[in-house]
Amino acid sequence: MSNKVPQSGETTLRGAIQIPFSDLAVLEMVPDAIVIAGRDGVIVFVNFRAEMMFGYSRDEFLKMDLVSLMPERFRESHRAHQIEFLSKPGTRPMGSRLELYGLKKNGAEFPVAISLSPFQHGEGTLAVAAVRDVSELKEVAEQLKQKVKELADFKSALDEHSILAITDPRGVITYVNDKFCQISKYSREELLGQDHRIINSGYHSKEFWREAWTTIAHGKVWKGEVRNRAKDGSFYWVDATIIPLFGINGKPVQYVAIRTEITARKQAEEERERLIQELKSALAEVKTLSGLLPICCACKKVRDDRGYWSQIEAYISQRSDAMFSHGYCPDCIGQLYESAGLPAPEADQK
């Protein structure tokens, strides 16, 4: 391989094609591989970058056709492009809609971007091809494409599970997902351009919201449970996380709110708390009997824990919700009739 640069006075590199030295010197300085071909497609000039890119020496280049620098599958279409170009000369990019590849001397293919420009001289029009190796660019583009797909998949998964909203620094809603519309019962058009006061239930205090806004305005993530009001007046609870996104100046430029509905859980917690309070109230009102109860064998009075004796009915009434009625049991009725000298009635033994 030669890196020979044309010297002053050289005006030709192949046959009778005359190329001014000043033009050749400029072409040696450009960062792209430059390949110049005549109307027959035969190469008449290459710069040093072309030698480095394709692996041929200048002498080898000057015996080759331009299409031999690309894989076989592109050659026929390139010849058609070349004929069209020479019939209507003008700078034009090639491969803007196609993936083009160059072919090195060792047979390796590599992605390229090519642009064609006409070069007028006394013998006619030459085709100047500027070739750029875009291997790294293509790799970066593939990586970017993969990242975009990953982000799209992540967003799709997030949309499926969570309620999403994005606001500007003033809190104006700029994006909502379908799940937000579904739970709030507002359309996307009704939500965009509004702030979150549109779903404010009035349940939380001003201090609650002041703390939330102060947190995110200072670039910190805020988390909390919020009760909102839907368009139809119904309430729903969400577990919310608000994340600030920063601009190049280090200040928040957007806020992303990710929420999960927890209405069922909050309702269960409220019901549990209600039952607990009811139970506490009931227990506070319940009067219980416990411990040793001294009872007089004769009058059957009961002594309380303060030493006072009272009728058993009064004692129990003070310590329970039981109510009393009085009567005689069958044994007592029999004794009464017997003491009176009367035959005892048939007793109900049930």
Image: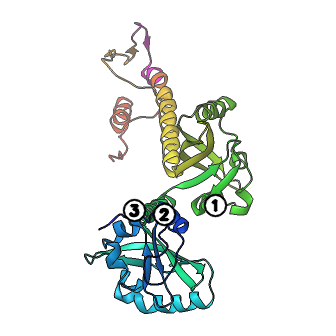
- At label 3, the amino acid type is Glu
> Where does the image place residue 170, in percent across and percent down from the top left?
71, 42
- At label 2, the amino acid type is Ser
Badge 3 element: helix
> Where does the image place residue 69, in percent across and percent down from the top left?
37, 80
The residue where tag 1 is placed is 181
Q: What separation in Å lies between label 2 and label 1 (alpha carbons)?
A: 75 Å
Badge 2 element: loop
The residue where tag 2 is placed is 8
Q: Do the residues labelled 3 and 1 touch (CB within 8 Å)?
A: no
Is residue 311 rendered to the left or right of residue 26?
left
Q: Do we see residue 104 in this rendering?
A: yes
Q: Is residue 332 magenta?
A: no
Q: Which of marks 2 and 1 is in front?
A: 2
* Residue 343, placed above or below residue 307: below
In this picture, which residue range is highlighted in magenta? 305-316
Q: Do we see residue 323 in this rendering?
A: no
Q: In which quarter of the image is residue 104?
A: bottom left
Q: Earlier in the sequence, mark 2 or mark 1?
A: 2
Identity of the residue drawn at 49% across and 26% down:
284
- The N terminus sits in image quarter: bottom left
Q: Which of marks 3 and 2 is in front?
A: 2
Is residue 216 rendered to the left or right of residue 336?
right
Badge 1 element: helix
> Where does the image place residue 109, in percent across and percent down from the top left?
32, 76
The residue where tag 3 is placed is 136
Crowd tier of the residue under label 2, counting other residues whose Cα lies within 10 Å: few below 14, some 14–19, many 20 or above: few
* Residue 314, placed above or below residue 191: above
Identity of the residue drawn at 46% across and 65% down:
32
- At label 1, the amino acid type is Cys
Crowd tier of the residue under label 3, counting other residues whose Cα lies within 10 Å: few below 14, some 14–19, many 20 or above: few
Q: In which quarter of the image is residue 87?
A: bottom right
